[in-house]
Image: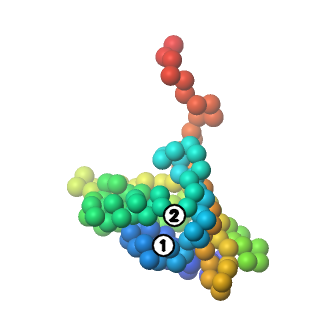
Amino acid sequence: MDDEILAFLRKHLQAIQNNDLETYHATTHEDLTLYEWWVTPHRIDGLAFHDFMMEANARRGAVFGAEAALGGATRFDLANLRIQRYGETAIASYTLLISAETPAGVRVDAHNESRVMVKMGGGWKVVHVHKSPAWQAPHVPPTTEQK
């Protein structure tokens, strides 16, 4: 396990969970590209998308990716984590488990993620994120017609 990358990744993800824009910007390249399957089937470019979501979540006391929390305790875990490092580039792939305290009990949401990080200017930056469902999605999109 690459301890340097793991520590960086945890800092980056904790910034997202804490709605900490300063640390998020310090750990994310401004030319970020990402796919978030539950938002849109298209690539999202730049930081403005997450800036808006994190600011809105902070005002509501919510955690990014754990809508059910709304002020309750939350945590994240990285299941099946694999870090691949190639010089100044690293790829982390894992299943992100976000546990949130709700009035009905603990709820756990899961997403498969890959994050590509590049070392530049003496520090690591996330440059690309790809998320997919942690359940088997249909290979063919559903049709609007019911048979």
10 Å crowding of disc 1: few (<14), some (14-19), many (20+): many
Q: Residue at image x 43%, y 72%?
A: 21
Q: Nearer the viewer, residue 10 or 104?
A: 10
- The amino acid marked with disc number 1 is Tyr
Q: How many numbered badges does the structure rendering display?
A: 2
On the rendered structure, is 56 left or right of 30?
A: left
Mark 2 vs mark 1, foreground winner is 2
Q: Which mark is residue 43?
A: none
Disc 1: which residue = 24
Percent of width and height locating residue 53: 40, 59
Residue 97 visible within the image: no
**Circle 2 — which element?**
loop
Seen at 56% across and 43% down, the residue is 41
Label 2, label 1: how far apart the Cα atoms are: 9 Å
- How was this image coloured? rainbow
In the rendered image, the quadrant that contains the N terminus is bottom right
Asked whether the residues under the numbered discs 2 and 1 touch, taking CB atoms below 8 Å apart as contact, a structural biologist would say: yes
Q: Is residue 146 above or below residue 30?
A: above
What amino acid is at disc 2? Leu
Q: Residue furthest right?
A: 87
First along the sequence among labels 2 and 1: 1
Residue 76 vs residue 103: left or right?
A: right
Is any part of residue 130 visible from this angle? yes
Local SS, label 1: helix
Of 112 and 118, nearer the camera is: 118
Say which of 51 and 39 sits in front. Answer: 51
